[in-house]
Image (cartoon, coloured by chain):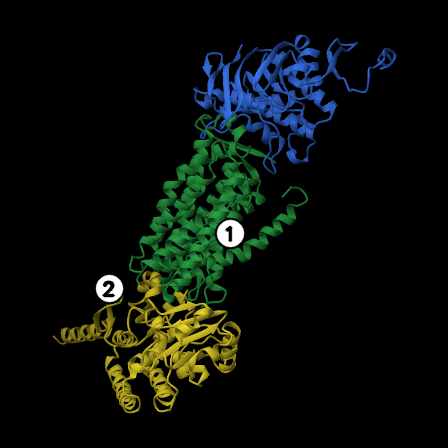
Amino acid sequence: MKHILIAAALSLSASMGLAQDTRSFTDGAGNVVDIPLQAERIVSLRGEQFTAPLVELGAPIVGSTGNIIDGVNNGEPVIRGAYDLFHTRFTEGGITHVGTSTQPDFEAIASLNPDLILLPDYRAEQYDQLAEIAPTVIINIWSNSARERYRRIADAAGRLDRFEELQAVYDFRLNEGRALVEQMIGDPSKVSVAIAEVRDDRFRVYKVYGAMSNVLDELGFSKPELIENIDGERLDLSPEQVQLIDADFLVSSYAEHFRAPPAEISGYWDVFVPGWDQVLHAPKHNQHIFIAREPMRALSFQSMSEVLAIYLASIVTRDFVPFEG
Amino acid sequence: MTNLTVEDVHVAYGATKIVSGASLSTNSGELTVLVGPNGCGKSTLLKAMARVLPLQSGRVRLQDLDVHATPTKNVAKQLALLPQGPIAPEGLTVRELVSQGRFPHQSLWRQWSQADTDVVERVMRQTKVAELAGRPIVELSGGQRQRCWIAMILAQDTPVLLLDEPTTFLDLKVQVDLMTLLRDIAHTDQRTVLVVLHDLNVAASFADRMIMMKSGQIVVDGPVSEVLTPENLKEVFDLSADVVFAPETGLPVCIPRTGAGPVTAPQAVAL
Amino acid sequence: MTTSVIEMANGRFALKLTQLVLWVACGLIGALIMIFAMSLGFGSYDMSVAEAFRVLWAPEEGTQATVVWKLRIPRFVAACLVGAMFALSGAMLQNVTRNPIADPSLVGVSQGASLAVVALIVLWPDVPLGARPVAAFAGGMSAALLVQAIAAGKQSTASMRFILVGIGVAAMISAGTSAMLAYGNINQAMGALGWLAGSVHTVTWTTCYILGLCFAVCLPAVVWSARPMAAFQFGPEVAISFGVRVRRDRFLVITLAVGLAAFAVSAAGPMGFIGLLAPQLAQRLAPSGTGGRLVLSALTGGVLVSGADLIGRTIAAPIQFPAGLVSAVLGVPLFIFLIIQRAKTSQL
């Protein structure tokens, strides 16, 4: 009898220890995956889209893709977005580098014994191998809004409660901002803002560009018609079309101080679109705003809060010359 | 005895007629030479005879086989063609090249037999390239190379051989050697050998029979002594020439009139 | 050079090979076995070669088994097959066109397959991944048919025409692919770029089965092709004189070459140099007749791609270099070295 009890107790404890509690999760590609209730060893296959929000959520990441970027982090690989926003780094026993997003090292991922892998939808061809290693969840990047994407990531990681907390804080600040807009401007759609950049002989306008466009949309500002009608995220223009993007404000991104600082970005404009700062209303009236690119691109409430603060300071709470289009 | 007969053959490249109504027949044991001015269609006729080019109308017969209607593999055992200026793949040795001539006698499953070895060794001796057997083709002189090609089509072991300008770009002595070889092949092996040539004197020295073509048609056909006449040369080649007979061999030789005035008798004798 | 005739069934079955070809073939098979052993034992997952072999004999559950059976072996198998198929395709095109630089990527096959896959990724992102091989095959085949249709003159068997038309069509198709990438959604364009790198990074056993099946289907045709190809190398006139049905067989060999390349591209993306490099390397290791050349080319292609993949995934891990890139980086200098070595005795 005693033996039977011990055996029963042993088998019960064994089954409890072995079988991790799981739940069923339908991912962006429609795969139904059994994933842990709360993942303990997550591998992220996209820096600014997955690793950055996971860091913000406080989720346990064991591996992430990374890139070697000339002149950044002493030539060591960096997790784009997460490095810039949270100074997240690859460390022994912390987050391990598992290669690039294009071709991650599957064996390095297997070595980490992950219990959840997050994969962007445009790398779905890697799904079969990854699914052999650990439960793998595909997150749709561009077909989801930033918040929906973030929510899906938090849900997969089992950190929805933390997501709600962070979202509530940001929404509180956003609502304060919206109130400020109403007080200072009235109807926000009367203010138009264009996001545009000149880089590598390419004049490009953006409809979607990380927190930079997301916060503009959430505050209710409008865009020039050309940008509003873009089917997708961005469009390359010829310099002759510069007047089509005229707006009250112009927003451009810059990289860290030594890679592509704002002065250099303005230099590109001078070369590729001569006279741009006379033709366009915004730069002519000192209404051209620069925002750091890498932190802004990280999917996080922190990025959105920072960009919100920038917009409140440089658009909402100041006097500006309205563009008479 | 295998005779090759051409019956009222017409050949065209697109809309351009090259051969219009050529008829001839060749006999075993004879070296027949086909001559004519550039562009007269002699090479085209040869290619049509070897089924490289399709006929517009007419027929080419090998005994009772229609060359263009018989399975090409069967024809390959009866008729071999050496085109003008063939190119050997890089690195190929003489024996390998000659061995390729056994192609029609082999199959996917039976790539080589003792009979193949025997034929290859025999034709290499016959063409005097046996001592070069292990050397790459590219290292050989033009004359040696041409002997190897002739050995290759001999290895095909066909009663009929067609050769398109096999002596072009070669020294006179080498041309003579090659033509001697071809004549021996025709005479001793009792094969039909038809050669397209452009050098009339070399042709006259070796041919048993000469055929002259002009503008896609056969103008004269017969023994060399009857064909190579000043009248025919004028008509076919638009060439004013004398035909004299070599003192030793009695073979006809064509000497163009150069237009430098009448040649006086004493000078001619001195030659 | 000593020539052996392997005879079976009373001479009804006889193969002719030089001994050098046999030795080189054995050497290449040895190299493949070596690469297989190293592919089993080397990688980012820490496991000794002995352990890997233990897992090979006793495939138990666990991460080690997953790494060996699901990651390392399919990659090796797919690399060998893809390499062999590109190499055979190149060898056939080089033979038919009588041009040593012919290659599936020179005459538009790889480009056609690439355009089809990129178009699928960019224009119809919702189409499942399984459609990619089908699209690649259709694209490669269409490009080849287009080239054939334009190049095939009334009487022409001119090989230069095929090459020139191929280069033109290839350039046109590449421009289409670039346009597609430039105006596609950025994420989709990135997905397409990953595929265009030419790698066996994402192959699974399913890929291997499909590739293996394609290879098995093509194999009898490859064996058949050796004979017409032996005649083609002397030009169409001699080939006709040898009794080969030149127009039909030429078309069949080109179709076979295109099919092999299209299957390979559909599995691994375009790998530019293998089709050029492998047959040329094989020919320089051991000059041989067409049958021997096909065997040696296929083996060389397998060694090149599997070796390149092994190096690409281990040398800078966790950074993974695509096999197509590594084989070009390592193969081209080797190729040039061999050309210089042989310059004294050969014309090329």
**Farthest left residue in view:** A1
Q: Residue at x 42, y 43 (%)?
A: C146
Q: Secondary structure at mark 2?
A: loop
Circle 2: is it few (<14), some (14-19), or many (20+) Cα within 10 Å? few
Q: Depth check: give the residue in front, A136 or B205.
A: B205
Disc 1 designates what residue?
C273
Chain rendered blue: B
Q: Taking C258 as reference, is B70 above or below it?
A: above
Where residue A282 appears, x then y in whole percent?
42, 82
Q: CA distance from mark 2 to mark 1?
A: 38 Å
Can you tell which quarter of the image residue B181 is in?
top right
Classify residue A12 by image quadrant. Answer: bottom left
Camera sees residue C166: yes
Which of the chains is yellow? A
Chain bearing tag 1 is C
Chain of the residue under label 2: A
Q: Which residue is mark 2?
A: A30
Same chain for marks 2 and 1? no
Q: Which chain is green?
A: C
Question: What amino acid is at disc 2?
Answer: Gly
